[in-house]
Image (tube, grey):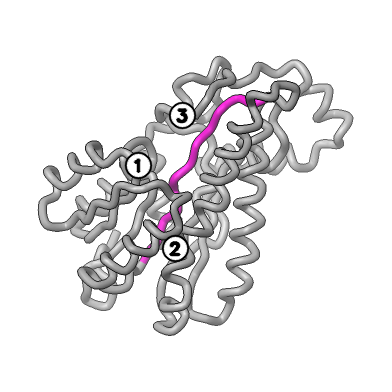
């Protein structure tokens, strides 16, 4: 991967950078010389990146639901490192949910706020400047779980389906502007989010391998990528199953454990 763009070091913004896929993506780009704005709620974990890559990590401990904090972080990073070449909206949460339980309503709200509106709020401070510069890439991390509604994961599936549609709308809006929009739909990746899943996870990837494949898709400016490709085939099949077949196949599928975020 060429970390330089027109002779300049790449600059990136990555949310959810304190663990899992976001941390792996941050480390991948930093190891190749990039300057990164690392955003996550847990600032103490982000500080480890500063120690590991001194002088090239700008840490912003904030919640992606906080639009003012995101704007302040964007202003600060642009002042210090310039307009980012790539913004990766990776922050996301998952929890088992069931509509019949009133206590799950707050979980539904939180999942949608982070996984969908958090993506919008992450991109918003950069879009106009990128359009003016006719340069930049906006990357949204969605999921194969957004292809069909998974039992016991109504909040997560709905949020990722919404993210996919939102990113498509944004891509069309940016068409011809010089700003690229990339939708990434990972399958199963070995992270704390999937560690609690009580069911088989086909084609599961090590988090570093998943990050490498995502970076390749971003480098290619792929508008829509499913990682790994085998999950793309699974997703293609699931989307085309008749409803009655899908319902029978998944009615007894195991559920992700319910819980608060």
**Residue 151's spot in the image, x, y percent?**
71, 26
Residues rendered magenta in the picture? 86-97
Residue topped by disc 3:
193
Residue 244, placed above or below residue 46 = above
Q: Disc 2 and disc 3: Cα gap in Å?
A: 27 Å
**Residue 38 falls left or right of residue 228:** left
The residue tagged with tag 2: helix, strand or loop? Answer: loop
Q: Disc 3 and disc 1: Cα gap in Å?
A: 16 Å
Residue pictured at 62% horizontal, 43% vertical: 159
Residue pictured at 59% horizontal, 59% vertical: 167
Which numbered disc flags the more N-terminal residue, 3 or 1? 1
Q: Is residue 89 magenta?
A: yes
**Residue 6 falls left or right of residue 101:** left
Q: Disc 1 and disc 2: Cα gap in Å?
A: 30 Å
Which numbered disc flags the more N-terminal residue, 2 or 3? 3
Q: Which mark identifies residue 41?
A: 1
- Which one is nearer the viewer's eye here, 116 or 138? 116
The residue tagged with tag 1: helix, strand or loop? Answer: loop
- Which one is nearer the viewer's eye here, 90 or 176? 90
Question: Which of the 4 image quarters holds residue 170?
Answer: bottom right
The residue tagged with tag 3: helix, strand or loop? Answer: loop
**Residue 69's spot in the image, x, y percent?**
37, 57
- Quick check: marks 3 and 1 in contact, CB under 8 Å? no
Residue topped by disc 2:
220
- Quick check: marks 1 and 2 in contact, CB under 8 Å? no
Q: Quadrant of the N terminus?
A: bottom left
Dot 3, crowdedness within 10 Å: few (<14), some or many (≥20)?
A: some
Dot 2, crowdedness within 10 Å: few (<14), some or many (≥20)?
A: few
**Residue 165 falls left or right of residue 197:** right
Q: Nearer the viewer, mark 2 or mark 3?
A: 3
Residue pictured at 60% horizontal, 33% vertical: 106
């Amino acid at each position: 991967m060429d970390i330089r763009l027109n002779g300049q070091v790449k600059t990136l913004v990555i949310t959810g950078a304190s663990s899992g896929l976001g941390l792996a993506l941050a480390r991948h780009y930093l190891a190749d010389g990039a300057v990164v704005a690392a955003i996550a709620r847990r600032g103490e974990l982000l500080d480890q990146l500063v120690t590991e890559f001194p002088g090239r990590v700008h840490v912003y401990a904030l919640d992606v639901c906080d639009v003012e904090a995101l704007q302040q972080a964007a202003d600060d990073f642009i002042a210090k490192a310039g307009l980012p070449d790539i913004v990766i909206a990776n922050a996301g949460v998952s929890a088992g949910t069931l509509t019949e339980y009133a206590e799950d309503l707050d979980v539904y709200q939180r999942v949608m706020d982070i996984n969908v509106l958090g993506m919008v709020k992450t991109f918003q401070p950069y879009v106009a400047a990128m359009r003016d510069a006719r340069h930049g890439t906006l990357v949204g991390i969605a999921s194969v779980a957004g292809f069909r509604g998974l039992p016991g994961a109504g909040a997560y599936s709905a949020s990722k389906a919404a993210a996919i549609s939102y990113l498509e709308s944004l891509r069309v809006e940016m068409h011809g502007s010089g700003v690229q929009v990339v939708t990434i739909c990972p399958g199963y990746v070995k992270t704390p989010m999937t560690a609690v899943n009580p069911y088989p996870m086909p084609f599961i990837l090590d988090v570093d391998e998943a990050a490498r494949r995502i970076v390749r898709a971003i480098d290619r400016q792929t508008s829509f990528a499913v990682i790994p490709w085998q999950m793309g085939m699974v997703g293609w099949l699931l989307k085309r199953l008749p409803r009655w077949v899908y319902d029978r196949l998944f009615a007894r599928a195991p559920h992700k454990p319910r819980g608060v975020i």
